[in-house]
Image (cartoon, helix red, strand yellow):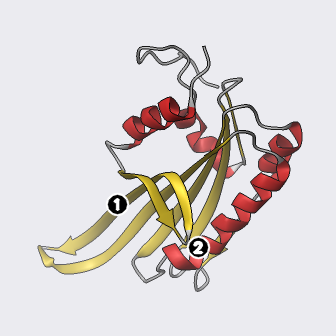
Amino acid sequence: METTLSEYLETLAGRLSPYFDVFRNEEVAGRRLDLVGRFKMRSEKYFFVKSLTLFAYENREIVLVEGDKEINRSKAEEFAGYLKDLIPLLIKPSEEHMSTMLTGVLVAEEGVTPEAQVWIGRFRHSQNFKWLLHGWCDVRLLAVDLASGQVYSNKAGRAVKEAYRVLKEKGGKEAAGPR
């Protein structure tokens, strides 16, 4: 049985919620997204007392999920452009900013075209801030095909590809094994 978009979004929200602040149907830079997740981790080293901080750094991840009937190359290119345009809007580089992963997930109910699969696999975008002194941002791009159960990603997205696998059976049972 195929998983519907709403079932997949519910499953994904459950997977992300222990670590991310998850929002449904949120608008980001004028675009309505099906699911948005925000994660922030701050680490610091201090000397004897916490008020004497030697250094601190932050790592963030922002997940943006959008569903559609079919994902073709032009849709993938347009969404990747949107992600690149979001970098200056969502990321505030500072001396404490180490990295931000901007993860864009396109979910297709009826399939991802072969041209889109190839284009997504070749897509890359990384941006450094003040020669890495204020950190960097990498863009992960993934496409989830609910019809076939496949997940396609660019090189940066391979690290999290397993987290976006498709629910295969009704009743909350997830398909076992990596995709």
Residue furthest out toward the left: 49
Residue at 44%, 83% (x, y): give it.
94
Amino acid identity at mark 1: Met
Q: Nearer the viewer, mark 2 or mark 1?
A: 2
- 69 lies above or below 49: above
Q: Which is nearer the N-term, disc 2 or disc 1?
A: 1
Q: In the rendering, at what x and y percent does residue 114 appear?
A: 87, 37
Q: To which quarter of the image does residue 88 belong?
A: bottom right
Pick the quarter of the image with the N terminus.
top right
Amino acid at the residue labelled 2: Ile
- Percent from the top left, x then y, of residue 131? 61, 83
Residue 138 pos. (x, y %): 62, 63
Q: Residues within 10 Å of mark 1 (few under 14, many from 20)?
A: few
- Tag 2, which secondary structure? helix
Mark 2 is surrounded, within 10 Å at the Cα level, by few (under 14), some (14 to 19) or many (20 or more) other residues, namely: some
Which of the two residues, 149 or 6, is positioned nearer the viewer here? 6
Q: In the rendered image, which quarter is residue 81 located in?
A: bottom right
Q: Is residue 139 above or below residue 171?
A: below
Report which residue position mark 2 lands on. 87
The quadrant the C terminus occupies is top right
- Which residue: 65% across, 29% down? 146
Q: Which of the numbered marks, if any, corresponds to residue 155? A: none
User: Which residue position holds label 1?
Assistant: 41
Q: Are marks 2 and 1 in contact (CB under 8 Å)?
A: no
Left or right: 95, with 5 as reference point: left
Q: Is residue 105 above or below residue 85?
A: above
Gap between marks 2 and 1, in whole Å?
A: 18 Å
Q: Secondary structure at mark 1?
A: strand
Occupied quadrant, residue 54: bottom left
Q: Residue furthest right?
A: 115
